[in-house]
Image: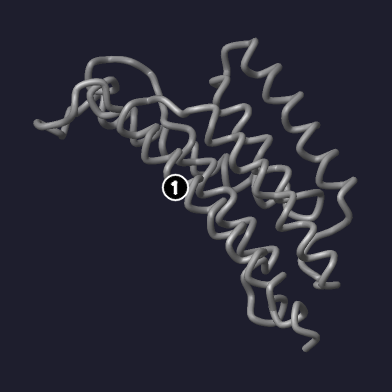
Amino acid sequence: MILLVLYLLCVLAALAVAAAAAYSDVRRMNVSNLHSLIVAALFFPAWAAAHIAGADVMAGLGPHLMTGGIVLAVTMVMFFMRLMGGADSKLAAAYALWAGGQGVSFFLLSMAFAGAGLSAAALLMRKYKPFKSFKEGSWVARVQGGEAVVPYAVALFIGIAVAFIKLGMLSPARLQSFIGG
């Protein structure tokens, strides 16, 4: 039971940090590297708890590490090509660590669709300027001021939430495997 509680705390905390990063990105167009570090660090006790309990919720450690490393390498190239922010790159890799090989396609596809939606919203906001009151420095302020920016931590949050759902990381059937059911 203790391992189940540890696992749940780590999964829910990772989702909460993802939501906090998304909120920060919308409010200030800034994501702290601490968000990525916390998300990545939370993976290890969650993975260990699942494997010690014999729960069927995550693959072996190798595929998770490899997936996180590949996503970090690809997104860092995107950063150097100025296609993605540095903090977004690190955050994507931290989430890919959680998704592993089984969930990375759901994560990346969901993230891409959410990013496209945010981009479309930014284009519409830049053209029509629908908001009259907004916080200076926020995404809305910057987009309506003519910048082409997207709070990609929002897309990352949506992507990892979809991957967690698809992987059944919080499904009752999978969680029951922690207590031998």
The image shows a total of numbered marks equal to 1
| Residue 141 in picture, x, y percent from top left | 22, 23
Q: Is residue 31 left or right of residue 78?
A: left
Q: Where's residue 84, x and y in %? A: 56, 21
- Place residue 6 in its image quadrant: bottom right
> Residue at left 74%, top 49%?
44
Check disc 1 and report the residue beneath it: 19
Q: Position of residue 8 (x, y in %)?
A: 61, 66
Q: Would you say 152 lies left or right of 76 here? A: left
Residue furthest toward the front? 2
- Whether 71 is drawn above or below 9: the answer is above
- Res. 164 in view: yes
Q: Quadrant of the C terminus?
A: bottom right
Secondary structure beneath dot 1 equals: helix
Residue in the picture at 86% in, 72% down: 54
Locate the N terminus and report the quarter of the image it occupies.
bottom right
Colouring scheme, one of rainbow, by chain, secondary structure, one colour: one colour
Say above or below: 102 vs 92. Answer: below
Is 48 in front, or is 158?
48
User: Type of residue at label 1?
Assistant: Ala
- Say few, some or many: other residues with alpha carbon within 10 Å of mark 1 (under 14 / 14 to 19 / 20 or more): some
Above or below residue 17? Residue 123 is: above
Q: Position of residue 36 (x, y in %)?
A: 59, 35
Q: Decide if residue 98 is on the left or right side of residue 79.
A: right
Q: Nearer the viewer, residue 21 or 38?
A: 38
- Would residue 99 be found to the left or right of residue 153 on screen? right
Identify the residue shown where x is 23% and y is 16%.
145
97 w.r.t. 29: above or below: below
Name, please, the residue furthest toward the bottom. Answer: 181
